[in-house]
Amino acid sequence: MNSVTLAFMIAGLLAFAAGAWFAATGERTAGIGFMMGGLAMQVLTLIRLKQEKKKGMHDAGR
């Protein structure tokens, strides 16, 4: 796993957790914004993992 992928993963989890905390403490708008950012980071992580897997399978065939 690439270090950038790992950074996206951790950032996504932290942003989503912060969003959940903000939403629970009454800052609903900020919470929703952080959650959206966290989910976007997780989508980017999944895209990068899929690309890395495809590249790994392609390289393994050589």
Image (tube, rainbow, N blue to C red):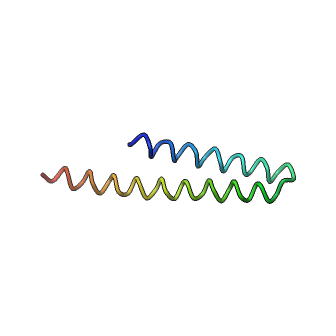
Residue positioned most to the right: 26
Q: Is residue 38 above or below residue 14?
A: below
Q: Nearer the viewer, residue 30 or 53?
A: 30
> Does residue 30 appear left or right of residue 12 in this picture?
right
* Residue 4 on image: x %, y %: 44, 44
In the rendered structure, the answer to whether residue 5 lies left or right of residue 57 reads: right
Name the image quarter holding the N terminus.
top left
Q: Is residue 36 above or below residue 16?
A: below
Q: Residue at x 51, y 59 (%)?
A: 43
Residue 56: x and y, percent?
A: 26, 50
Q: How many marks overall?
A: 0
Residue reaching furthest to the left: 62
Where residue 11 appears, as percent x and y from the top left, is 58, 45
Please report the residue visible at 60 percent of the width from the left and 57 percent of the height from the top.
39
Q: Residue at x 68, y 56 (%)?
A: 35
With 35 as the anchor, is 52 left or right in this view? left
Quarter residue 48 falls in: bottom left
Q: Position of residue 60 (x, y in %)?
A: 19, 50
Q: As drawn, is 38 to the left or to the right of 22?
A: left
Judged from this view, the residue extending furthest toward the top is 3
